[in-house]
Image (cartoon, grey):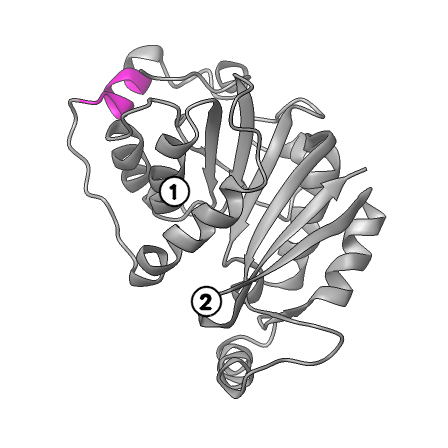
């Protein structure tokens, strides 16, 4: 089952339906990318997510920002057949891997990916979603390996695209009120900033400011394995 992307034809008229069918046909063979960290964290992420989403209402919509290889969508979507997963990615060379996970999804509820530059306003995306069109958003391990402008853009998108009462889930390492623990996370943060001065583990207190500016608030914090956290942001 191939799910259409709302508004895709309007913004990408040069891509024919035949091309889209070939690109995402289940019979096509694509190489799946696999990352050990995603293999390790998929199960704990699924447990945190499943405890907080509606598992019965049909046709709910989830937007994933920075889907990467598509591993998380491939793991989560079969567990939530009532939710349509919309992967997005900045790196177009990941689309084939995302398509492979979508093709293997037994519940058929992963849409074709589309390109998103999260630093841009959602109204300027290649396939701009309608305001308030998503029940959930999900973002994993992006904020610390991207410039602060990406975190700004993520919360802006959540403010525009989530329905009232919708939730955004973010996963990764975070500091709290200027305190980053344990030492391994301190070392990790230092190594990130040495690689790129615009990267680094984000502080939840700073994310709360972004949330408030966009009509959200931190609703729940779950401690996760490997010194990570699962944060739930509620759209007010």
Q: Nearer the viewer, mark 2 or mark 1?
A: 2
Mark 2 vs 1, N-terminal side? 1
Q: Give the residue displayed 29% in from the left and 62% down from the top.
A: 36
Q: Give the residue displayed 31% in from the left and 15% down from the top.
A: 1
Does 38 lie within the magenta span? no
Task: Give coordinates of residue 161: x percent, y percent.
Answer: 68, 31
Q: Which residues are magenta?
A: 19-26
Q: Is residue 230 above or below residue 205?
A: above
The secondary structure making up most of the magenta span is helix
Q: Which mark is residue 209?
A: none
Q: Quadrant of residue 51?
A: top right
Q: Give the residue displayed 43% in from the left and 16% down from the top.
A: 4
Q: Which mark is residue 225?
A: 2
Badge 2 element: helix
Report which residue position mark 1 lands on.
92
Q: Quadrant of residue 17?
A: top left
Task: Give coordinates of residue 19: x percent, y percent.
Answer: 29, 18
The Cα–Cα distance between marks 2 and 1, rounded to whole angstroms, is: 30 Å
């Amino acid at each position: 089952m191939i799910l259409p992307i709302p508004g895709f034809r309007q913004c990408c008229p040069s891509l024919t339906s035949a091309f889209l069918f070939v690109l995402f046909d289940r019979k096509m063979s694509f190489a799946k990318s696999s990352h050990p960290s995603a293999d390790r964290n998929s199960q704990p992420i699924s447990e945190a997510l499943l405890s907080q989403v509606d598992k019965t209402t049909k046709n709910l919509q989830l937007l994933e920002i920075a889907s990467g290889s598509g591993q998380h969508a491939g793991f989560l979507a079969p567990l939530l057949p009532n939710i349509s997963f919309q992967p997005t990615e900045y790196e177009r060379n990941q689309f084939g891997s995302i398509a492979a996970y979508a093709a293997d999804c037994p519940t058929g509820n992963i849409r074709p990916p589309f390109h998103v530059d999260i630093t841009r306003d959602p109204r300027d995306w290649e396939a701009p979603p309608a305001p308030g069109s998503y029940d959930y958003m999900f973002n994993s391990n992006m904020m610390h390996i991207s410039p602060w402008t990406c975190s700004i853009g993520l919360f802006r998108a959540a403010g525009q695209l989530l329905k009232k009462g919708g939730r955004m889930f973010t996963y990764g390492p975070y500091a709290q009120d200027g305190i980053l623990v344990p030492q391994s996370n301190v070392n990790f943060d230092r190594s990130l900033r040495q690689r790129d001065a615009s990267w680094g583990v984000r502080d939840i207190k700073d994310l709360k400011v972004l949330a408030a500016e966009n009509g959200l608030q931190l609703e729940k914090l779950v401690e996760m394995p490997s010194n990570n956290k699962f944060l739930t942001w509620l759209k007010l």
